[in-house]
Amino acid sequence: MQQPGRAAEIKANGIGKSFGSFRALDNLSLDIGRGEFLTLLGPSGSGKTTFLMILAGFVQPSEGKLFSDGVDITNRPAEQRAAGMVFQGYALFPHMSVEQNIAFPLKVRKKSASEIKSRVGEMVERVGLKGHEKKLPAQLSGGQQQRVALARALVFEPGVLLLDEPFSALDKSLRGQMQAEMKRLHQETGTTFVFVTHDQSEALALSSRVAIFNHGKLLQVGRPDEVYDRPANRFVAEFLGEINMLPVKGVRPADNGATGLCEDRAVNMRCKAEAIKGDAILAIRPEDMSIAPEASVNENGIAATAVASTYLGAATKLDLTTRQGAKVTVSVPNEVAASALSKGNSVWLTWPAEKGFLLPDGGQ
Amino acid sequence: MRGTLSDRAGAALLMAPLLLFLILAYAWPFLGVVKWSFTLPTPGLGQYHALLTDELVQSVFIRTLRIAAIVTLVSVTAAYAITVVWVRGSPVQRVLAEFCILVPFWISVLTRAFGWVALLSNRGLINTWLQSIGFISEPLTLVRNEFGVIVGMSHFLIPFAVFPLASAMRSLDERVLLAARGLGSSRMRTFWTVFVPMTRSGIIGSAMITFVFSLGFFVTPAILGGGRSVMIAELIYLRIFQSPDWGLGAAISFVLVVFVGALMALLFRYVKPKQLV
């Protein structure tokens, strides 16, 4: 995180942190690539913010090492790491104007007055704050304060930008706008971004990779489509979006996949079953399942009863109960939902063999 | 604060005895003092004319303002350091600071003034110690002058200066300080360019309270000044009880009250009352 203008490559090795008897972070190892947009995702108290604070140098890890571009920075104080940081609530200097806020990191670095002036001007323009330079933070809207925070964190060209839930205080439409803007800033600056959020859709939309945390442990790291389609465990699967869990009995390997019994009907799965034998859980996203009037030989399917529907505009969310009592949610076109509910509610639930994945029975 | 009508009526009822007491025991008698200033010894503005021309009165006014300004500077600076430790120190430091702030409230102002005399006089602890180690040959004049008055008054006022500062420091967003450090600012620089400016309202409130208190000090300057460094309150006392010149004493009192009132009005334009506690 040293050379200005150059994206940093960060390596965390066996990082752990305890606060008294509370284990906030446990044996975390993670490589953050040069110029990548990594999101740390997890519920509150999962350790994601602690890890960000360790990256920034505000929190000292209890064990483990941290490297930036191959240099050990574990004991380097925050002011010497100089990672750009955007805080929850922005943490702007309330007694300084927009201009003075953005100039602060440059003044600290003793840049010449003319360089400060030109770089602040450039940054103000880049984040669309022209005309607001002389205002105090209290005179700005939430979105504008957010832009000042981003500009202040990026103006000194840090090797890495750390963002702690920066959009949590914004309303939904502004949030989308700021997300797009941040993606653009990431592409323009080429800096490494590490972003903390508890919002899974935000994580999937923005990042080049997502790291999912729970109870102080890093559970999985991967591209958004990887973690969404092939979650490592049940927690990841459920945290990334709604998912159905169907018990499957007698799982065994078969031609290009696995086979087993779901509610007494043979089902085929394309996913590998080497690690899983016997009883397992088949996890399928609601959008991967559909409703058919009757069973088809070529497709997986079980009988179910439609119980309720929620109209979502573009589609309808249909809640069903299978014959053996499993609760299933399916996202279907609106007219399909209407006819399913009208036909005595009894329908056939189907899904293609290549969708869904197997998880160990009852396991996390 | 907002509340229903009955809430406000209840609050007014609870405040009423205090207000009534202030009117009966303070405002009403004071109106009598104001009357004296225009009537004694003869009706007219004679005493106010004397105020403007009497060199002794003027020199006491100027000395009072000078001492109050120095005491304010000393007290607010010392209180700032104590408050930083009290609000942001380790648990042990906090307890120690709290002890230092509260203990002076338990000891009477008279006791403390004589305590300072014992410490600062020619044959007091400080002078005898400095002489015994051979640092000085003649005792230093530390008391019965302005220096002694400033020491004693600052000692009394520091705890009062702490509370507005503590309130400002407690309401400060910790993340702003982290942000400054994260942007590369050293601890010292963060303190001077971020922490101190962000506690500005506390500094103003603290300085105003100290200054206003200083203006009316009587016992401490009377004892530690030893009659050589008379402040305005002592002058009023002398005019009324020793050289019966009630009219002039009353006129000085009235001017002092108006001056303090104006300062308080100025204070509340910049600082909300609840920021002071």
Image (cartoon, coloured by chain):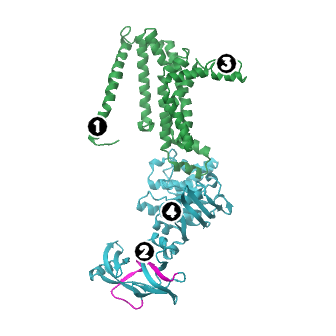
CA distance for labels 2 and 1: 57 Å
Q: Residues within 10 Å of mark 3 (few under 14, many from 20)?
A: some
Residue A281 highlighted magenta (yes or no): yes
The one nearer the camera, A170 or B82, is B82
| Chain-order first, disc 1 or disc 3 | 1
Instruction: Name the kind of residue labelled 3 in the image.
Output: Pro
Spot occupied by residue B155 in the image (x, y as percentages of width and height): 54, 28
Give the numbered dot on residue A243: 2
Where does label 1 land, which residue? B10
Residue A275 highlighted magenta (yes or no): no
Q: Colour of chain B?
A: green
CA distance for labels 4 and 1: 48 Å
Q: Is residue A273 above or below residue B137?
A: below
Instruction: Name the kind of residue labelled 1 in the image.
Output: Gly
Spot occupied by residue A25 in the image (x, y as percentages of width and height): 56, 61
Q: Colour of chain A?
A: cyan
Magenta span: A276-298
Check chain identity for marks 4 and 3: say if they share one. Answer: no
Circles 4 and 2, Cβ within 8 Å, touching? The answer is: no
Instruction: Kindly identify the residue that appears in the image at 53 percent across and 24 percent down.
Output: B112
CA distance for labels 4 and 2: 21 Å
Question: Where, by quadrant of the figure, is residue B23 drawn?
Answer: top left
CA distance for labels 3 and 2: 87 Å
| Chain-order first, disc 4 or disc 2 | 4
Instruction: Kindly identify the residue that appears in the image at 49 percent across and 58 percent down.
Output: A166
Q: Chain of mark 4?
A: A
Where does label 4 land, which residue? A46
Check chain identity for marks 4 and 1: say if they share one. Answer: no
Q: Is residue B147 above or below residue A154?
A: above
Q: Residues within 10 Å of mark 4 (few under 14, many from 20)?
A: many
